[in-house]
Amino acid sequence: MKLVIGGSTGFVGTELVRQALLHPAITSVVALSRRETPVPLQDTEAGNALKLTSVVCNDFETYSDDVRNELQGADACIWTIAVTPRKQHTVPFEEVCKISREYAVKAIQTLAQSSTGHSPEQRNDDQPFRFVYISGIAAKRDRAEAEKDQMLVERGMVEYCLVRGDAESQILAFAEKSHGRVEASVARPGLIFGPREDDETRRSMPGFPSIELAKLAAALLDQVINGFEKNMLLHDDLVRLGQNAITRRR
């Protein structure tokens, strides 16, 4: 499998790259970011490191020909790029919309075209291109529902969560109209925490359940490799899938 990881130098993307390089089912990892993606030092052998192709993309709205060439023949993509809830008030709202929604929609459109780049002997016409959009547990697709959520109102998150929900809708609609050529799933994790974060970090956003970074990455890789369980992976689904995937590797 040739896997594209959008946002490969970020918090989630870094762990996805690390686990993807170790996974025997993944033969190529295209790490897409605004800067070079380093080879993870932890647990990564020299042979696995050869799977990694770091691709620097300066514009996620209009992909250059060089970037498109690197994406040719991709089987799947996990898209991590978005403005996080903690940073939403530090970024102009227009940028929130562009980074959290427009970039993702453009990505699935571009990758769906590029996935046809398999050579005839490599292409499996029965295998759709798979795309995962990492959203969030508080994403909303209905304004009335969002405005009734007191926690979102108090934290000034209503518009942000509607943008994330609209991104979900556009991505799923694109896949639905692809006549089976593209499959998409939305992941809605709660608060994601890494091994160095403590309970105080998790308490900084009370009201949200938490998931370990390694478990989330394992769940997403399992889904792009083996097929989507459903097109909306909720927090509890991700915890379960991640734990099962980690257990199988032992």
Image (tube, helix red, strand yellow):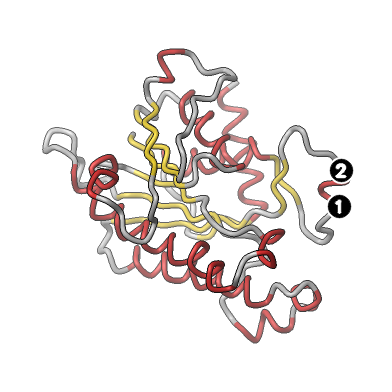
| Residue 43 image offset from top left, x and y in percent | 57, 17
| Residue 5 image offset from top left, x and y in percent | 44, 42
Alpha-carbon distance for marks 1 and 2? 6 Å
Residue drawn 39% across and 41% down?
A: 56
Query: What residue is disc 1 on?
Result: 203
- The residue lying toward the viewer, choosing from 37 and 137, is 37
Q: Amino acid at mark 2?
A: Asp
Depicted 43 relative to depicted 159: above or below:
above
Residue drawn 46% across and 71% down?
A: 169
Depicted 189 relative to depicted 162: above or below:
above
Q: How many marks?
A: 2
Seen as rendered, the residue at the extreme left is 120
Residue drawn 66% across and 61% down?
A: 137
Query: What residue is disc 2 on?
Result: 199
Disc 2 residue crowd, few under 14, some 14–19, many 20+, Cα 10 Å: few
> Given contact means CB atoms under 8 Å apart, are the residues at marks 1 and 2 in contact?
yes
- Left/right placement of residue 216 relative to residue 75 reads right
Secondary element at image label 2: helix
Residue drawn 74% across and 75% down?
A: 156
Seen as rendered, the residue at the extreme top is 46
Q: Amino acid at mark 1?
A: Arg
Disc 1 residue crowd, few under 14, some 14–19, many 20+, Cα 10 Å: few
